[in-house]
Image (cartoon, rainbow, N blue to C red):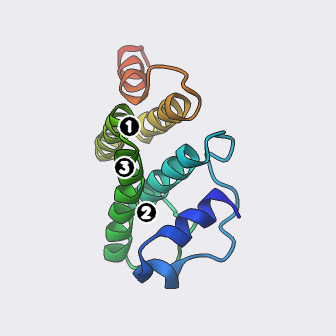
Amino acid sequence: MSVLARVAEAAEPALAAHARLDPGPGRFDQVADPDRAFVLEAVHEGYLMHYGEPRAFSGMDGDLRLLAGDTLYALGLARLADAGDVAAVAELSDLISLCAWAQADGRPDLADAAWDAAGAKLGAGEGDGARAAVAQRLASPA
């Protein structure tokens, strides 16, 4: 079962009717730690519910998509909090807020950079994370 399929299965029962049977590969399938892969995919799917096209769910109106996105953010963050990984919770919290800011400012490129950096930090322990990546992009001349 793919990580995205596991996310869809773990989501609130009210979302089950909207789950795709085979959501396909996820963005973080290469992450070695299955718990980290799950967390990253859950939060990324929540992000896509808000700002893009979700991969594991379909057929929701805009209001339900926003609520479902929040639910998926909470699902991922709760898994980290239960494990006591405060630093990872902080990284994902930064990521979520940076992505919201970037989208509101019309800079989806910054959101993409934040996702790449957070995925590297949380998935492989590489790099300085989302906040540093966005700061570096903002400091670089266009």
| Residue 10 appears in the figure | yes
Q: Which residue is mark 2?
A: 49
Instruction: Give SS at disc 3.
Output: helix
Looking at the rendered image, the quarter that the N terminus falls into is bottom right
Above-or-below relation of 14 to 91: below
Q: Which residue is mark 1?
A: 85
- Marks 1 and 2, how far apart in space? 25 Å
Towards the viewer: 57 or 124: 124
**Residue 94 x %, y %:** 32, 36
Q: Cβ–Cβ below 8 Å for labels 1 and 3? A: no
Which one is earlier in the sequence, the residue at label 1 or at label 2?
Answer: 2
Other-residue count near label 3 (Cα within 10 Å), few / some / many at <14 / 14–19 / ≥20: few
Amino acid type of the residue tagged 1 in the rendering: Asp
Q: Is residue 112 left or right of residue 34?
A: left
Instruction: Give SS at disc 1.
Output: loop
Other-residue count near label 1 (Cα within 10 Å), few / some / many at <14 / 14–19 / ≥20: few
